[in-house]
Amino acid sequence: MFDLRDLYQQVIVDHNKSPRNFGKLDDCNHQADGYNPLCGDKLHIYLRINDAGTIEDVSFEGDGCAISVASASLMTDALKGKTVQESQIMFEQFQHMATSDLSESPDEKKLGKLAVLAGVREFPSRIKCATLCWHTLQAAINDAASPAKTE
Amino acid sequence: MMLNVENIRSQFPILQQQIYNKPLVYLDNAATTQKPQSVIDALCGYYTHDNANVHRGVHMLSERATAAYESARDKIRALINAASTREIVFTRGATEAINLVASSWGETNIGAGDEVLISEMEHHSDIVPWQMLCERNGAKLVVAPINDAGELMFDAFEAKLSERTRLVGMVHLSNALGTINPVSDIIAKAHAVGAKVLLDGAQAVAHLNIDVQALDCDFYVTSAHKMYGPTGIGVLYAKEALLESMPPYQGGGDMISMVTFEKTQYNDLPYKFEAGTPNIAGAIGFGAAVDWLCETGVELIAAHEQRLLVYATEEALKFEGLTLIGTAENKATVLSFTIDGVHPHDLGTILDREGVAIRAGHHCAMPVMQHFGLPATARASFAAYNTETEIDVLFAALKKAQEIFA
Ligand SMILES: Cc1ncc(COP(=O)(O)O)c(C=O)c1O
């Protein structure tokens, strides 16, 4: 039996209630929209990447369920000071965690706090809520013209 | 007389199951209702005993299939009191029926400068086909607003009617809000300016008595799956004179009486609008669903659902942090709401773990969400087999959701 607390861990509830890095980033140099057409979740990500390719600052705005808000909050916290290249590896690791088999326990050493979101694997309809911010990050890095979708 | 709910529940095999070791509480009836054994048996019986194509065989099976298919048409005719089966066109559902009208009648009757008047509470299926038509033909889509109770603002509706209005498209019972629209008055006002009226009855037929002749509506559409029937089948009712004047929607087999490469003569009504092999099993299942509704009694079902809605509304008003969306004076079967601090999508997941199925989202009525400034709502919707106990389970689960997010 899966427990709801596997999904709604206290960390997630807290990040949903008081999301970190929430709001506009005035001196950003990359940004993008993300949209989950299934549930209407909307996200906007702001990034400031310096010439060396380091993410100096990142923030988000949006309207969504607890999973999507907490995921964006945790992601932005984790990205600060990382290089774009490192962010790509984190994205892959996160994707892997969110879609991996339940028997595989998340690699907390690599994932850090992001590992609290491993519970979404037990709730297939909610995986996209957790990955939306990462797809939006990709769109922002690539200055994509159209909003990122989870589909 | 009261509905015997225990007896009704026993006729729905799907309800006898557990979800995460808890009894299934199915409150997503506005999305689709469950099916009684008699409907399942009708589908199964057709494929087991009578499967053949309709209207084209001289053999026994084809005759049986045709008779069952046509008898389903007559059951639907009787249910909505249409004058003739010539006015009953099978479609894939309400959506296809509206598209049929927009394409066939709309294309010939709505042009540049004309207007289509709909309401702010329409389902996307009664918005987008008109939007597409207006874009093609240079017509204008006009929207009558709703108030904060989720009721049509009748004066504003009337003010938007004019001799330019060619068609009024109106939901009979709103899936997002539960509002029942004053359709008789709407039709009278629309006819007074020479406009035709299409009623979207996708939600209404399982909950209200429909009499298309008494209403004097021009088009009425619905889907079987929202009235205890199968998916993939629905109906367009239209006045015979209108159907006679309309060009076919799709071309193919069954809709013709004579084909040469020079010219095709179209078949009689309603077959002119039923190109290709239809959803025969679906139509027969639809017929069985109509039988079930009539035997159970639409009025008894409606009275039962109304008791449930009153009870649920009372509970909702007592529930701290809950806001009802849609508080029309005249409403049925739908309890749409939000809860402070808990997103509807999270509510949906938490309730699911308690065995409670509700809908969380925009309910294919994004303009309604925009009116209330919400991304989504949670929606419980009731049917004949629901009970007060299930409503108690719903509210206990909502409490649990609040606790998780406390
Ligand atoms: C009010 C209303 N209109 C139209 C539809 C469309 O019905 P269908 O998807 O069966 O064609 C629905 C179903 O969601 C509805 O609730």
Image: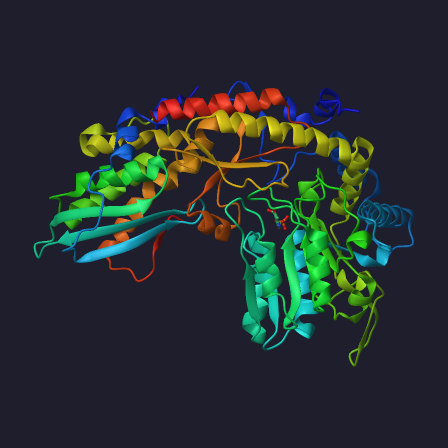
Residue B69 placed where, x, y %? Answer: 83, 48
Residue B266 in the image: x percent, y percent? 81, 70
Residue at position x 16%, y 54% from top? A26
Total marks drawn? 0
Quadrant for the N terminus of chain B in the image: top right
Nearer-the-camera pick, A64 or B189:
B189
> How far across and down, in percent of the image, does residue A3 sit?
40, 21
Residue A22 visible from this viewpoint: yes
Question: Which image quadrant for residue B119?
Answer: bottom right
**Camera-side residue: B296 or A74?**
B296
Residue A86, given in percent of the width and then of the height, sits at 16, 45
Q: Residue at x 21, y 33 (%)?
A: A111
Residue farthest along the left direction in this orientation: A52
In the current view of this chain or complex, which residue is farthest to the front? Answer: B155
Judge from the rendering whether residue A55 lies leftward or rightward of residue B88; answer left or right. Answer: left
Q: Is B198 left or right of A94, judged from the image as shown?
A: right
Task: Place residue B102 in its image quadrant.
Answer: bottom right
* Along the line of sight, the residue nearer the viewer: B64 or A13: A13
